[in-house]
Image (spheres, rainbow, N blue to C red):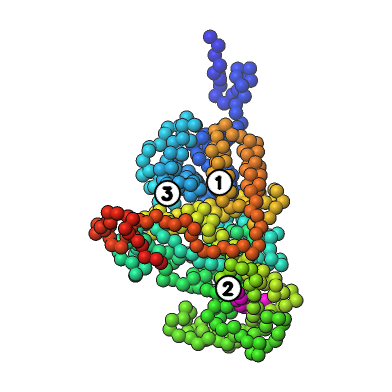
Amino acid sequence: MKNNSLYLPGFHLSTLRRKPRSAAHKLADSLAHIRRHSISSLGECFGRFIPSKVLENGEAGSFSRRRVFSKTNTFWAFFSQVLDADGGCQEVVRKMQALAASRSLPSPSTSTSAYCQARAKLEISELETILSRTARNLHEQGQTERWKGRRVVVVDGTGLSMPDTAENQSMWPQTRAQKPGCSFPQATVCACFCLHTGALLSHRMGSRKNHELPLLRQQHDQFHPGDIFLGDKGFCSYFDVDQFQQLGVDSVVSVGVRKPVEVASALAVLAHNDLLIQWPKPKWHKKSSYSKEDWRALPEKLTLRQIKVVVDNPGFRVQSFYIVTTLTDAQTYSAADIADLYYQRWDVELFFRDIKTTMGMDILRCRTPAMVRKEILMHLIVYNSIRLLMLNAAKQANVSQRRISFKASVQALRQWEPMLNRNDLDARERMRLMVLLREAIAATIVLSRPGRSEPRCRKRRPKNFQLMTSPRHEMKVIPHRDRYRAKRA
């Protein structure tokens, strides 16, 4: 019988057996073993975009032990849950079971308890760090797409609803006009987007009682000198225009409560419907959204530019409106350019539609305020990640990112995800699949339809179900639905 053992410890004879494996080979085997126990195929797609160090298990604490739902697996499972069309926790568990079966690993339990507990252990601060990292990367990669060499930050607010629990109601109460148990908690989100890349830069969340302006003031650190702030008439404020000027940021907003300045009161007439004006300092009252000390620090007058825009396209709600801006140089920024820039403000409505309707953030699922915030953060992280794919696909196909369909990009990523989760996939094959994914994303181009009317209405009629006008345990159902007629809104 041949003896292949070493006759001296640490001494190797090449004639007895093959050479020992190097440290690089051992490290590669360890990484391959970890990947088999991980669902981080999405993480490998977005590895340069989302910092992996934040997702590493700590030496102590909630994720100190390596389990099925480690910090990395939990994050990417949450990521996949937001990306899925169903969006339920059971869908994630089924996906974990399928991945475990394909990789000959022990199958996790059918219960969603372990996943929900692991998801609750994710820190909000770490998710905010990942979101800010995604916004910064998109900003750096989208440097070439700017308006006259300047970044345009468009701001708007929207509303969200969530499950009717006591914790959510205490944080985001429902409207007073509705009875308890008949409505849902309502929240307001004010977000800042990059107009050209569509990246979500920052956001703040409040209740329905919070106005969007105070939420915007909490995000002033996201603006850089040289940026342009673009907003609707809800952000037309003397105080905020002055604050942005002090930050070196120009403003382009439509006139809200203030009356437009007449030609006779203007400082100068730059062109037809283009005036150089001065706004006097408003009076302070107790309902003002800023303190009296801040009001005293305001200048007595602001020199602005007022542009009247005439809308010739049929189907729009207004025939004309006014824009005020701090871009007073008529030679560099013509009235037509500024009017076209404000026309692009509608893109922020499409950004919110992508997040709320396409990705399903309009109606949240979590039952506690902490998990609601995590759910919102994950939706925004996934949104920025898809915007990254769209940006890379646009560069690869040499097309404009604004022409690429966001919904088609989500659909493509959903269908490519099982292919990227294959166990036998090497680096070269994964790179080939990513190139094909970007080609598929860039292939769906949205047609340019300038002047198209976008009425805010619903074409499909809702079913004539009875409205809930009392709590569930007191509700009496009408026997015949055909006899019930809901009051018109």
Q: Residue at x 62, y 24 (%)?
A: 19
Location of residue 462 in the rendering, given as x and y in whole percent from the top left corner: 42, 56
- Which amino acid type corresponds to the residue marked 3 in the rendered image? Arg
Q: Nearer the viewer, mark 3 or mark 2?
A: 2
User: Which label sits on residue 119?
Assistant: 3
Q: Magenta: predominant secondary structure element?
A: strand
User: Quick check: is 325 in the magenta stretch?
Assistant: yes
Please say if the residues under marks 1 and 3 sit with CB atoms less than 8 Å apart.
Answer: no
**In the orientation shown, which residue stands out farthest toward the right?**
331
Magenta region, residue range: 318-327
Residue 384 figure quarter: bottom right
Q: Is residue 206 left or right of residue 435?
A: left
Residue 242 figure quarter: bottom right
Q: Is residue 77 above or below residue 365?
A: above
**In the orientation shown, which residue stands out farthest toward the front?**
483
Location of residue 231 in the rendering, given as x and y in whole percent from the top left corner: 57, 71
Name the secondary structure under disc 3: helix
- Which amino acid type corresponds to the residue marked 1 in the rendered image? Gln
User: Quick check: is 444 in the magenta stretch?
Assistant: no
Whole-angstrom CA distance, mark 2 to mark 1, is 36 Å
Residue for badge 2: 318
- Which amino acid type corresponds to the residue marked 2 in the rendered image? Val
Local crowd size for mark 2, using a 10 Å CA cut-off: few (<14), some (14–19), many (≥20): few
Foreground residue, 288 or 262? 262
> Is residue 314 at least partly visible in the picture?
yes
Name the secondary structure under disc 2: loop
Q: Residue at x 34, y 69 (%)?
A: 177
User: Which label sits on residue 411?
Assistant: 1
